[in-house]
């Protein structure tokens, strides 16, 4: 794990770090990645291609429209709402 | 009569039935304790007015003889990870420190409908990421039990540290926790209370702020095993709003809880026999707990879980991976903190960097890494496969035993200063006994077993059951509890 890689991951994660934070996150991530590398020793050849399927299973709901009636309440937590819109910094000139 | 705040849920029920005291008196007594023990930092938000109003409704029902359930009139603490309608819900994070949910989580809704009284929202590690309640934006919760040798304060454990402190410190009759890798069981062990993580799918996750969705599960933290059963009765149940909620009948967990363990086979994983664990914990497990269960008529059997050595690494890939995805929603647009920036991307970056704490950022970074191009197969996909092997190990073991017993933690509670010498991995190693159970989706309970020999700190024993067989671990837990 080098500085360039850490910065690349931080960009993907939408996080920024001060220089001294970068030193410790680089060190910690390096250690953690080395530590989780033990998994490479695990023999998973007994599992078939569907080895990751969840046996308990997932349900899907009926594809029907439900009215929550919460639109106004949901806007209450927005920092800068405009009528029923969320606002963000200008994205087009 | 003992103090109202010393009573178990069961004893509150007896008192209410005999009309010996009112729910409002019990609630006031707890609120007084919360006020007097604010140094424990167990609560992020205390909802005294709402609690008193709810208690008056319980009083009315009690006086009319129309109590709704065994948790009617029972004042509880709610981990501040459960969304509570119109009551601030922070996940102990700066990024959500003014978030007021417009809806109620299913588990809290179930309890409210059953008449429970909510005293407030309890402290936790930020987004439930941590094992000592040290990562909370609102400061650490403190264990009500001090270390006997030097009188020093020790951590509550985490992430449900505030819930544990509230029950152990007499600041709630019971509390709600969530457990992704041990977050109910480990703090229960550190504070000398009972904590149960139900089978994945037993309690709805709807309205619980997500950390690692495939592992998160709500559960009760209580003074006794029987109280734990009572609470679980009113938390569990199918919910169409959670796609992983399992549509299976919820038994009355109090029924047969005193039946004992006669004739049961209890497994001890041989892979853990040589783990480096604290001497007192080793003794409480291999000697005391084994003896209690044998005396009660159980047979102890050695079992093998060959892939257990991969559990921590598997967890610390899968949980951060899911967290990095789940926490992508905190962008400053719709709710939570917003820190302005020159562009939309700048605003995301500024908001997230200011809003998340160090451990949360570390896990988002690791999660993003293991999901990124070039590493996805080697880490994330591999971890999913190893998870399946770990679960298979347990299912194989359960062909020959009724439950499995391990310690809850490898060491007793430590001080905040001691934790400063821990690097992240040392902290992660605390989860060695609890994490595999979340990966295997099984139910497990931590029950107090002993105090450490010199420091007199609580130690917990963990009992692990088959899928949806919480009843059996409750029975065995009751035997351990009764033998003290």
Image (cartoon, coloured by chain):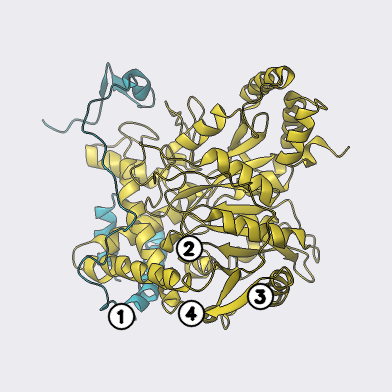
The residue indicated by pointer 2 is B437
Mark 2 crowd level (few <14, some 14–19, many ≥20, 10 Å Cα): many
- Discs 3/4, front: 4
Question: Mark 3 near mark 4, Cβ–Cβ under 8 Å?
Answer: no
The chain coloured cyan is A
Is the residue A36 above or below the residue B260 in the image?
A: below
Judged from the image, the secondary structure of the residue bearing numbered disc 3 is loop
First of labels 3, 2 by sequence position: 3
The chain coloured yellow is B
Label 2 vs label 1: CA separation?
20 Å
Q: Which residue lies furthest to the bottom in this view?
A: B274
Locate the N terminus of chain B by quadrant.
top right
The residue indicated by pointer 4 is B304
- Asked where in the image residue B248 lies, by quadrant, the reply is top left
Camera-side residue of B295 and B433: B295
Mark 1 crowd level (few <14, some 14–19, many ≥20, 10 Å Cα): few
Is the residue B146 above or below the residue B354 in the image?
A: below
Judged from the image, the secondary structure of the residue bearing numbered disc 1 is loop
Question: Which mark is on residue A43?
Answer: 1
- Discs 4/2, front: 4
- Discs 1/3, front: 1
- Residue B379 position within the rendered picture, expressed as x and y whole percent measured from the top left: 29, 69
């Amino acid at each position: 794990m080098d500085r360039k890689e850490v910065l690349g991951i931080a960009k993907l994660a939408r996080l920024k770090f001060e220089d001294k934070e970068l030193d410790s996150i680089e060190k910690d991530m390096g250690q953690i990645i080395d530590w989780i590398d033990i998994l490479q020793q695990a023999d998973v050849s007994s599992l078939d291609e569907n080895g990751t399927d969840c046996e308990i299973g997932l349900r899907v709901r009926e594809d029907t429209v439900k009215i929550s009636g919460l639109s106004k309440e949901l806007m209450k937590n927005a920092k800068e709402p405009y009528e029923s819109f969320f606002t963000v910094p200008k994205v087009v000139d | 009569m003992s103090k109202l705040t010393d009573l178990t849920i069961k004893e509150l029920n007896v008192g209410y039935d005999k009309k010996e005291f009112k729910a409002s008196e019990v609630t006031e007594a707890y609120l007084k304790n919360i006020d007097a023990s604010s140094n424990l930092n167990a609560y992020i938000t205390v909802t005294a007015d709402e609690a008193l109003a709810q208690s008056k409704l319980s009083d009315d029902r009690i006086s009319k003889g129309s109590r709704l359930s065994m948790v009617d009139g029972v004042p509880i603490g709610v981990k501040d990870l459960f969304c509570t309608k119109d009551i601030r819900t922070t996940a102990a994070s700066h990024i959500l420190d003014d978030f007021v949910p417009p809806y109620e989580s299913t588990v809290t809704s179930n309890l409210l409908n059953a008449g429970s009284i909510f005293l407030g929202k309890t402290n936790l590690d930020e987004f439930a990421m941590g094992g000592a309640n040290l990562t909370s934006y609102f400061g650490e919760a403190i264990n009500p039990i001090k270390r006997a040798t030097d009188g020093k304060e020790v951590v509550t454990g985490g992430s449900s540290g505030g819930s544990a402190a509230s029950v152990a410190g007499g600041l709630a009759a019971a509390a709600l926790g969530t457990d992704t890798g041990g977050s109910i069981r480990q703090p229960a062990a550190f504070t000398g209370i009972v904590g149960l993580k139900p089978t994945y799918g037993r309690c709805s996750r709807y309205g619980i702020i997500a950390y690692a969705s495939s592992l998160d599960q709500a559960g009760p933290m209580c003074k006794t095993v029987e109280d734990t059963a009572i609470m679980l009765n009113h938390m569990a149940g199918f919910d169409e709003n959670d796609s992983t909620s399992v549509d299976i009948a919820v038994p009355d967990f109090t029924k047969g809880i005193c039946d004992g363990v006669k004739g049961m086979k209890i497994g001890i994983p041989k892979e853990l026999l040589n783990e480096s664990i604290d001497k007192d914990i080793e003794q409480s497990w291999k000697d005391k707990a084994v003896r209690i269960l044998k005396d009660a008529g159980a047979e102890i059997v050695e079992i093998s879980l060959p892939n257990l050595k991969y559990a921590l690494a598997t967890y610390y890939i899968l949980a951060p991976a899911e967290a990095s995805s789940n926490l992508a929603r905190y962008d400053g647009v719709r709710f939570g903190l917003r820190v302005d920036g020159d562009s939309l991307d700048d605003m995301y970056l500024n908001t997230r960097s200011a809003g998340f704490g160090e451990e949360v950022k570390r896990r988002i970074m690791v999660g993003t890494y293991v999901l990124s191009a070039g590493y996805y197969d080697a880490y994330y996909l591999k971890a999913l496969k190893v998870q399946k092997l770990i679960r298979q190990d347990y299912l194989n073991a359960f062909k020959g035993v009724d439950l499995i017993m391990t310690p809850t933690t490898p060491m007793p509670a430590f001080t905040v200063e001691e934790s400063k010498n821990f690097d992240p991995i040392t902290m992660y190693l605390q989860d060695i006994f609890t994490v595999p159970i979340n990966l295997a989706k099984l139910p497990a309970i931590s029950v107090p077993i002993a105090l450490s020999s010199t420091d007199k700190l609580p130690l917990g024993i963990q009992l692990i059951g088959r899928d949806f067989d919480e009843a059996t671990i409750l029975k065995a837990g009751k035997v351990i509890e009764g033998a003290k």
